[in-house]
Image (tube, rainbow, N blue to C red):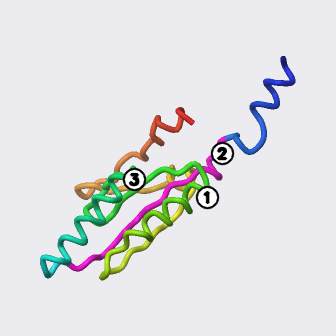
Amino acid sequence: MTAYLHKANSGPRHLSGYRIMWMLVTFDLPVETKKQRHAATKFRQHLLDIGFEMSQLSNNLRFCNGKEQFETYVRQIERVLPEWGDIYIFPFTDKQYENIIRFSDQARKKQRKNPDQLALF
């Protein structure tokens, strides 16, 4: 039984703050025409539908459990790219997420604790 437990807790399934990652999708989409506004809204809604959280209107953030899942989301986003505008996707590790410095209302805020959802994996 001990050997089984040891084996189950090692290997590629072990979650590491350097393996699990976040992805930030940031975009600048034109909204001058009705068609452009519709495309931008549709793109933003798609990000929400696949589990992204809006941190600002043009910045969406999502947790990924590794590079494979990151690439899956990149392909999903690529399939619904609007005809116009720029979209950037930034990967960073969970350890890097812990070190984000945030200012709000001209004051430095405490570092955010990584979400409790990580315990689900």
Q: What is the crowding at mark 3: few (fewer than 14 residues within 10 Å), some, or many (at least 20)?
A: few
Magenta segment: 15-30
Q: In the current view of this chain or complex, which residue is farthest to the right?
A: 3
Residue found 53% across the figure and 51% down from its top: 64
Estimate the x, y position of residue 48 in percent, counting from the top left: 32, 53
Disc 3 versus disc 2: nearer the observer: 3
Asked whether 94 or 29 is in front, the reply is 29
Residue found 42% across the figure and 45% down from its top: 112
Relative to 43, residue 10 above or below: above
Q: Which mark is residue 16?
A: 2
In the rendered structure, which amino acid carries the disc numbered 3?
A: Ile
Q: What is the crowding at mark 1: few (fewer than 14 residues within 10 Å), some, or many (at least 20)?
A: some
Asked whether 94 or 20 is in front, the reply is 20
Residue 29: say if magenta: yes
Q: Which mark is residue 42?
A: none
Q: Which residue is label 3 attached to? A: 50
